[in-house]
Image (cartoon, rainbow, N blue to C red):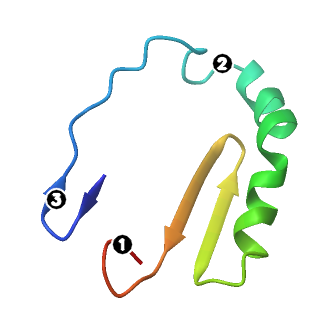
Amino acid sequence: LSFDGYLSDWIPILNGIGQGDPLSMVLYIIYNSDLIDVAESSGRRERALAFVDDTVFIAIGKDFHE
């Protein structure tokens, strides 16, 4: 996470499936399909973009806390 000069520490990921695994697309559809709808219907200045098994969330605010 990087915001206004703040850079968070790296977080090790110790479980999951490997990048590029064909199973990831199926799991994405099952587990995260409603995730896009939540951001789009929140009424705030938030957006979610997704393609295959990648998702990006964009939130706009005046400061970090907003």
Q: Residues within 10 Å of mark 3 (few under 14, many from 20)?
A: few
**Residue labelled with disc 1:** 65
| Tag 2 residue | 21
Residue at image coords 61%, 14%:
17
Q: Assign the C terminus to one quadrant of the image.
A: bottom left
Distance in Å between CA atoms under marks 2 and 3: 33 Å
Q: Residues within 10 Å of mark 2 (few under 14, many from 20)?
A: few
Q: Is residue 56 left or right of residue 26?
A: left
Mark number for residue 38?
none
Circle 1: element type? loop
Q: Which residue is mark 3?
A: 6
Outermost residue on the right side: it is 30
Q: Amino acid at mark 1?
A: His
Q: Position of residue 32 (x, y in %)?
A: 77, 43
Q: Name which of mark 2 and mark 3 comes first in the sequence.
A: 3
Q: Are dots 1 and 3 in contact, CB under 8 Å?
A: no
Specify the amino acid type for callout 2: Asp
